[in-house]
Image: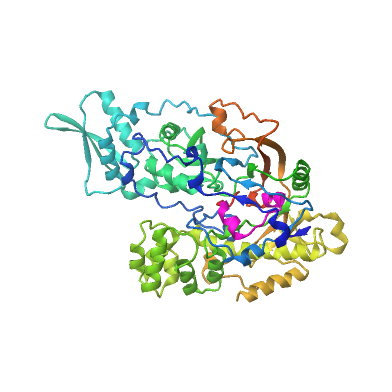
């Protein structure tokens, strides 16, 4: 075990380049919008629909802990403002020297493949559409003009007061009418159609079938009973997080985002491959998006009876390239062997705590303290560090006037957390901050308190390793099934450090039977929280707690060091490269630069960035970590 020290780590500091504006031209492609998917002019395209909540319905606190939270990406904080956060991630388990390298010089250097509940790694390798005689013909995508599509979309989304939209049938044949009926019903869920004669001319009239609810519940009667209600597909995406991707797909399909389900959210600055399920949208219609969208690819379609649920995945497989490494072949060998044999400390990555000057765990602590004025101030107050201009103006307005409506007017994008809170304050008033805060989607609210739990856990695991090293000791906790039990003196030799777990604080966990138990109590007491009473008067914010292994050993670890001359060339093929038949890259025996390409699998809720930190022995200052721009990886 080694400890992080300022001088020795400068040599092993991880350089990260995460500025999209500096990326090569082909990596900053704008989303291409084709008329086949969206008929409005691009400058008039509205913002994405409201983000889909990660889980719905009743949830226990244990469910909440397993939930994937979205990261708010509204700027970078300055180094030094969150020193205490970085101080909680201080230990290493390996003894090698460490070296430097560049992570995510290109987003394509970081590829994540989901490991499904069956243990299979998800790959996009089949773009074919399941043959189904009940699917409408390809003509449904072209039979309506751009003007008709725009008119129908505005009508479908209740953007005008029309009670119906009539489309004249120029070529009056039954086949032509059938295709127009199919096109309207397929492309605009919630609309029904009928044929009418008007003054000797035939019109197909579209009207609302079931009000605004129809968007979230695609028409039931048009779906074949023999077919499963959900279309499952593999989504390949580049440089977009899962929530953004679903918002884009739902916008182009003209449906609500909450009809999509998935097993875990994935990184933004990466290429990721994961399974998605959607309610009653045909594979044909989903495949059509491949003609319209760039940086996305949909395939491996199948119809299933059930949606997907968060947490069902077994983990993720990572392919990561660290460019321009300084380590010798021996150093790399030593570092990777240590990762394979010992593993790494299972810290929550710094991205868990947000990318802004106010870390999310501070907001979480204020929620748990019931300090609602502080919650409001932490989210809305002006802050240092890089932020979008409109957010800066919004915060300035809030600081000056404390008028939620005036501050809200400064925000062109109202769906950010700040906009939602201001909307709540406008609705419920400054004396009812709890209800105002409740307007923020549930999983975003829970993100704050889970972040606080993670912060406590990181601090406590560093202290546990500092005090007791990398061997199990009497009083440590291990899991038997889902139940935590203590290691007794006589049983110590039956366990390894890989068996030991530490609790996230809550009302339904036990704490170790050694001095780390008192350290938990002291930390929560210092934060004005009672470790013996983690129930909150608002049930959503009651924490039951959970257990987390302190050391993780990655599976399927392999690596190679490659030489290259051009920093822009890809160093391995993606699924799409393989689909397109591109040959794999050929490396020179000598090159200007060296890169470490590594593959490994991790269980859910484990951070690849923490595995990479262990390999490089890198500095984990907030300045480096916030540039990583990763959402937590499951």
Q: Position of residue 437 (x, y in %)?
A: 45, 66
> Can residue 4 be seen?
no
Using residue 491 as the reference point, say whether residue 435 is left or right of it. left
Q: Where is residue 464 in the image (x, y as percent from the top left)?
A: 75, 64
Residue 413 or 258: which is nearer the viewer? 413
Residue 614 is one of the magenta-drawn residues: yes
Q: Which residue is drawn at 82% across and 55% down?
A: 495
Colour mapping: rainbow
Q: Which residue is drawn at 33% across and 42% down?
A: 42
Magenta: main secondary structure: helix
Residue 217 or 348: which is nearer the viewer? 348
Reply above or below: 353 against 434.
above
Residue 115 is one of the magenta-drawn residues: no
Q: Quadrant of residue 66?
A: bottom right
> Can residue 109 be seen?
yes
Write the start and end of the magenta stretch as one range: 611-628
Q: In which quarter of the image is residue 400?
A: bottom left
Q: Where is residue 257 in the image (x, y as percent from the top left)?
A: 43, 47
Quarter of the N terminus within the rendering: bottom right
Q: Position of residue 150 (x, y in %)?
A: 28, 40
């Amino acid at each position: 075990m080694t400890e992080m020290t300022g001088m020795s780590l400068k040599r092993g500091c991880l350089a990260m380049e995460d500025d999209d504006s500096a990326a090569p031209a082909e990596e900053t492609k704008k989303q291409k919008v084709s008329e086949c998917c969206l008929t409005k002019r691009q400058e008039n395209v509205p913002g994405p629909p409201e983000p889909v909540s990660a889980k719905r319905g009743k949830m226990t606190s244990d469910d909440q802990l397993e939930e994937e939270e979205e990261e708010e990406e509204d700027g970078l904080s300055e180094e030094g403002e969150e020193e205490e956060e970085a101080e909680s991630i201080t230990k290493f388990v390996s003894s090698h020297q460490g070296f430097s390298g560049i992570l995510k010089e290109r987003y394509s250097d970081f590829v994540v493949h989901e490991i499904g509940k069956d243990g299979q790694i998800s790959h996009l390798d089949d773009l074919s559409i399941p043959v189904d005689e009940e699917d409408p013909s390809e003509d449904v995508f072209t039979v309506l003009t751009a003007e008709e599509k725009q008119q129908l979309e505005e009508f479908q989304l209740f953007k005008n007061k029309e009670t119906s939209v009539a489309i004249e049938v120029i070529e009056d044949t039954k086949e032509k009418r059938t295709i127009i009926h199919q096109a309207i019903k397929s492309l605009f869920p919630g609309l029904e159609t009928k044929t009418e004669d008007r003054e000797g001319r035939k019109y197909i009239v579209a009207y609302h079938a079931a009000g605004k609810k129809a968007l979230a519940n695609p028409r039931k009667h048009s779906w074949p009973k023999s077919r499963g209600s959900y279309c499952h597909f593999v989504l390949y995406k580049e440089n977009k997080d899962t929530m953004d991707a679903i918002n884009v797909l739902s916008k182009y399909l003209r449906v609500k985002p909450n009809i999509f389900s998935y097993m875990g959210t994935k990184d933004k600055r990466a290429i990721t491959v994961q399974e998605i399920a959607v309610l009653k949208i045909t594979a044909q219609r989903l495949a059509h998006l491949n003609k319209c969208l760039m940086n996305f690819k949909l395939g491996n379609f199948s119809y299933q009876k059930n949606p997907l649920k968060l947490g069902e995945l077994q983990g993720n497989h990572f392919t990561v390239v660290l460019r321009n490494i300084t380590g010798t072949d021996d150093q790399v060998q030593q570092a990777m062997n240590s990762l394979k044999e010992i593993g790494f400390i299972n810290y929550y990555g710094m991205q868990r705590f947000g990318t802004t000057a106010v870390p999310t765990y501070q907001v979480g602590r204020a929620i748990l303290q019931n300090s609602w004025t502080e919650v409001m101030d932490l989210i809305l107050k002006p802050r240092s560090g890089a932020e979008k201009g409109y957010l800066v103006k919004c915060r300035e307005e809030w600081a000056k006037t404390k008028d939620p409506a005036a501050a809200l007017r400064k925000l062109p994008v109202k769906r950010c957390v700040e906009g939602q809170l201001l909307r709540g304050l406008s609705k419920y008033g400054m004396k009812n901050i709890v209800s105002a805060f409740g307007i923020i989607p549930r999983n975003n609210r829970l993100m704050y308190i889970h972040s606080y739990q993670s912060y406590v856990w990181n601090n406590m695991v560093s202290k546990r390793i500092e005090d007791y090293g990398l061997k199990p000791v009497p009083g440590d906790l291990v899991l038997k099934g889902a139940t935590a039990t203590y290691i007794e003196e006589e049983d110590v030799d039956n366990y390894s450090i890989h068996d030991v777990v530490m609790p996230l604080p809550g009302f339904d966990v036990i704490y170790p039977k050694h001095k780390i138990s008192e350290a938990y109590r002291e930390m929560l007491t210092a934060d004005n929280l009672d470790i013996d009473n983690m129930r909150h008067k608002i049930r959503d914010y009651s924490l039951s707690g959970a257990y987390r292994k302190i050391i993780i050993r990655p599976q399927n670890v392999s690596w190679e060091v490659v030489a290259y001359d051009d920093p822009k060339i890809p160093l391995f093929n993606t699924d799409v490269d393989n689909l397109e038949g591109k040959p794999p890259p050929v490396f020179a025996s000598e090159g200007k630069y060296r890169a470490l390409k590594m593959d490994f699998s991790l269980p859910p809720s484990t951070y690849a960035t923490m595995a990479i930190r262990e390999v490089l022995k890198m500095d984990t200052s907030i300045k480096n970590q916030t540039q990583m721009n990763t959402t937590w990886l499951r």
